[in-house]
Amino acid sequence: MFEKILVANRGEIAVRIIRACKELRVSTVAVYSDADRSSLHVSMADEAFHIGPPAPGESYLVMEKIIDAAKRSRAEAIHPGYGFLSENAAFAGMCESEGIVFIGPTAQSIRLMGDKITARKIALKAKVPLVPGTDGAVTDVEAGGAAKKIGYPVMIKASAGGGGKGMRLVRKAKEFSAALGMARSEAHGAFGDDSVYIEKYIERPRHIEIQVIGDSHGKVLHLFERECSIQRRHQKVIEEAPSGFISAKTRKQMGEMALRLAKAVKYRGAGTVEFIMDQKENFYFLEMNTRVQVEHPVTEMVTGLDIVKWMIRTAAGQKLPFKQSDIKMNGHSIECRIYAEVPEQNFMPAPGRVEYIRAPSGPGIRNDSSVYSGFEVTPHYDPMISKLIVWAGDRTEAIDKMRAALDEYIVLGVKTNIGFLTRLFKEAEFGRAEIDTGYIERHPELLKAQLADLEPALAAAALGMRNATREVEEPAAQTRSNWKSFARRLAVSRSQAL
């Protein structure tokens, strides 16, 4: 086992990794930008190194700064978390050349699966089902013909990216040329590569992913599926395990396909094989994420396996001590992402100071977060406040538990999506698992704030009155100042429902 690991990330995933390291009795090193000097992951780590200004391009994405911090701290390994450098083959290769263990797949595996066109070719060779589409990147001239041959509607997709960047849905031939130009422009801006490919669009698709984990001794296992169909702007909002839709037969087939692909690239560490599924349970390979996923906790909750710890153990050379038949699922788990954002304004980020936060707790409730009262949600990074995860005996119970947990969640000072999530979990269609990636767009009523959203404000009022009774001995000016501050917080909370 390693003696010291550098965590090349921030926020809740850095906290998650540091906690896993502590349980493994491994020392940790944090890195931080100017904006993260007071962040939780910095105070939790055994050592911390400043790496630059807030902008990721000047701090968390500068490979040389991360490597330098690892060398100065004498860390034996680097855990990249997700985002930033986690799927950067060049960074994984740099770690290897510097004698530092990259906690994740090899640079070669990342390189092979990081390019969507190459990944499709590997999947085709491994006999994993693919959505009808072009075999590789296409020129402008080829693209139009390919779209016509495949048949509308089609998706234009960036070859080198993800997260919805460089992606356009085209339903009619007359819309294709303009959409192609926009997709190329966005792809170039996001990834420095404007190459795209064309793929058949699946109507009302579901997004199902299979969690895999492998060691450096040739063993690769899957930890079953997660359903991630509830998305906004092609980004996941709610994830659950297992899926409330697929049959046991389909689950088995998807697991086998995921293993074929992972074994084809000699996969080590944690990763996911992503599939798109139609309403008849036909599934097709979408992409592979060569890192730990934001939604990994739901898999941990139903399997009892700590994915982050096993990433560290396998990177240290340990063998996976169990076989596929040993892995079972128990109950149902759901995760929702709590964001500082404004759902009714196309989920626009809403950075600011979190004046007060109270997360729910209790049996079967987990809250992965790095945010605390007084924390500043900056515009430089993803505005996630936390990942709220619940576990129960079945899906219905899990939904009820999540609804109750959201009712307890209080965040003052910034606008959040808690009201939106509460409404979504009350939807009858969601309760019946009748969902797909276009669910939110089909339910615009979810974006309309309701009177129930005032509950956090009412709780804040009660909190303010309680605190005021403790201030009777303070100077009058100080008391007035405290009440003015509270009034501002209450106004922000009320504005979430107006």
Image: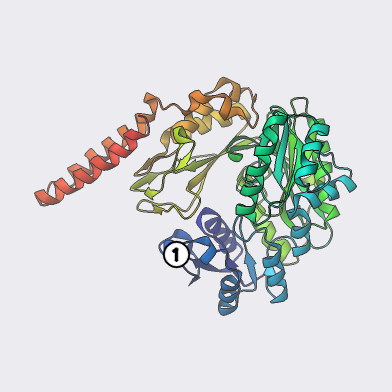
The quarter holding residue 314 reads: bottom right
Q: What scheme was used to colour the molecule?
A: rainbow
Image vertical order of residue 486 relative to residue 39, above or below: above
Question: In the visual, does 17 lie left or right of 120?
Answer: left
137 and 59: which one is in front? 137
248 sits left or right of 289 in the view: right
As drawn, which residue projects farthest toward the top?
Answer: 428
Where's residue 40, x and y in %? 45, 59
Q: Local crowd at mark 1 within 10 Å, few (<14), some, or many (≥20)? A: few
Residue 54 location (% of width, % of height): 46, 62
Q: Is mark 1 on a helix, strand or loop?
A: helix
Residue 126 visible in the shown view: no
Residue 139 falls left or right of residue 72: right
Give above or below for 411 relative to 217.
above
Task: Name the quarter where the N terminus is drawn.
Answer: bottom right
Q: Which of 270 and 361 is in front in this view?
A: 270
Image x and y of residue 401, in percent: 52, 32
Tally of numbered discs: 1
Residue type, mark 1 in image:
Ser
Q: Quadrant of the C terminus?
A: top left
The relative height of residue 302 versus residue 370 in the rendered view (above or below) is: above
Horizontal side of 367 relative to 206 (left or right) equals left
Q: Where is residue 398 in the image (x, y as percent from the top left)?
A: 57, 32
Q: Pointer 1: what residue?
A: 43
Residue 57 can be seen in this image: yes
Which residue: 85% across, 49% down? 121
